[in-house]
Amino acid sequence: MLCITVIVFATLLTRESYVEEPTVNYEADYSYREDDLHAQIIKAANNTYGYDIVANGRILIHQPHIPAVNGNQGFATQEDAQRVAEFVILKILQNIFPPSVSVEEVDSLIILSKTIKEN
């Protein structure tokens, strides 16, 4: 009985020492061309807008509210959502993952959008 216990224990130790850890190749997993990606503007709560980033026909990012801003407020206009979505796509194309957006970036993109409309 002791012999069987030793064999089982040795087998378990041997199996654990040869278990390979999974590796993630971020460059291969997140490498997209411009033709692979596009933004879809979606309707969100309270007559606002969000966006989906679609990669090769599959939703990569679903963003129904303004990123980096507290709460669940959507974009006031489709143009604001489109501008931020295009900015996120640029980050993805540069292999920046996650393609997070700061409050300052959102503010500058929306202000730029309003400035363009006024001129």
Image (cartoon, grey):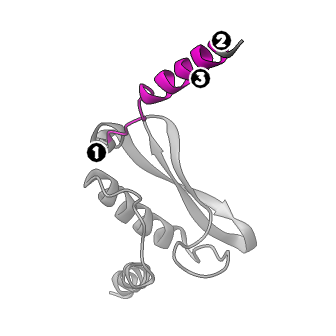
The residue singled out by tag 2 in the image is 4
Q: CA distance from mark 2 to mark 1?
A: 60 Å
In the picture of the structure, the residue carrying the numbered disc 1 is: 34
Q: What distance separates the C-alpha of mark 2 from that of mark 3?
A: 9 Å
Callout 2, which amino acid?
Answer: Ile
Q: Residue furthest front?
A: 2
Question: Residue 9's mark?
Answer: 3
Label 1: few (<14), some (14–19) or many (≥20) C-alpha neighbours in 10 Å: few
Tag 3 secondary structure: helix
Residue 107 location, x and y as percent?
43, 85
Between 95 and 47, the one lying in front of the other is 95
Q: Closer to the camera, 117 or 107?
A: 107
Q: Quadrant of residue 113?
A: bottom left
x and y, in percent, of residue 98 in the image: 41, 59
Magenta stretch? 3-25
How far apart are labels 1 and 3 at the CA level?
53 Å
Tell me the residue at 61%/82% (across/down).
70
